[in-house]
Amino acid sequence: MGPRFPLFHGLRSSLVSALRGWNALFPLLMVVSTIVFVASGVDRAVRDAILGPIPFVWNDERELVFRAGEAWHVALGIWLLLIGLVWRDRELTGAACALLQALIVCGLITLFLKYATGRPPPSRVPDAADWKLLGFTRADLRVMWPSGHTSSACAAAASLSVFYAGKRWVAPLVWAVALTVAASMLLLSFHWFSDIVAGALLGFTIGRSVGKTLRAWADPAPPPAISPA
């Protein structure tokens, strides 16, 4: 019999796991690191260093990078899912659902945080401390904390690297893509440096938790114990 469709399998336990024990440090690190980078001037220094040598003259190219960064993992997840369902491959189906579930969960959390913090992009305001906390507004068209591209890319990379922990080539490949996406968001001044760090921390903990849960679903059940006669 073919595999079930476990897109939301273990969702509650994954969320609990992502915020339990040592994992509870990740949300704290998101906030603390942002405060440190803003207060110390690191955010502004990085923004100024990038805005100088990289002027905003590549609008079409920037938009292409932006769209590619938000689509690659969705396309990969759908592709893996289709192959898994057609081939009736439980592992591929589990990997696809791990990736897509991590993207959905991380995307919703990121979206809430963006609206709640209301941080304008570095290309719009000179002050890294210019926030519209709890305003739930998009007056600046895009709200930036944490970086959604980075959180999604790291959630995708973490979910697949944990799910395929036995395949050593998977982690370097997916993390190389994720870090490239994160770097592009910084170098093209879509985000402050602290947005990138916060997004990476959020994506990592969500993706790792979901990857572990779906890996357990994909693994075959152990054979029943045989009672001695």
Image (cartoon, rainbow, N blue to C red):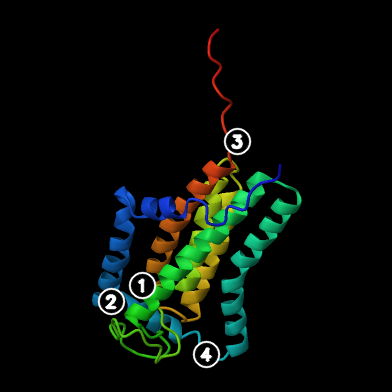
Q: Residues within 10 Å of mark 1 (few under 14, many from 20)?
A: many
> Which is nearer the eye, 39 or 106?
106
Numbered tag placed on residue 218 in the rendering: none
Q: Secondary structure at mark 3?
A: loop
x then y, percent, for residue 228: 53, 9
x then y, percent, for residue 220: 60, 35
Q: Which residue is mark 4?
A: 56
Q: Nearer the viewer, mark 3 or mark 4?
A: 3
Numbered tag placed on residue 220 in the rendering: 3
Q: Which residue is mark 2?
A: 38
Relative vertical location of residue 221 with respect to residue 73 in this rendering, above or below: above
> Which is nearer the eye, 160 or 222?
222
x then y, percent, for residue 42: 31, 75
Residue occupying image coordinates x 65% and y 66%? 75
Q: Secondary structure at mark 1?
A: helix
Hey, which quadrant is residue 24 in on the image? bottom left
Q: Residues within 10 Å of mark 4 (few under 14, many from 20)?
A: few
- Residue type for callout 4: Phe
Whether residues under marks 1 and 2 lie with C-beta atoms below 8 angstroms apart, the answer is: yes
Q: Secondary structure at mark 4?
A: loop
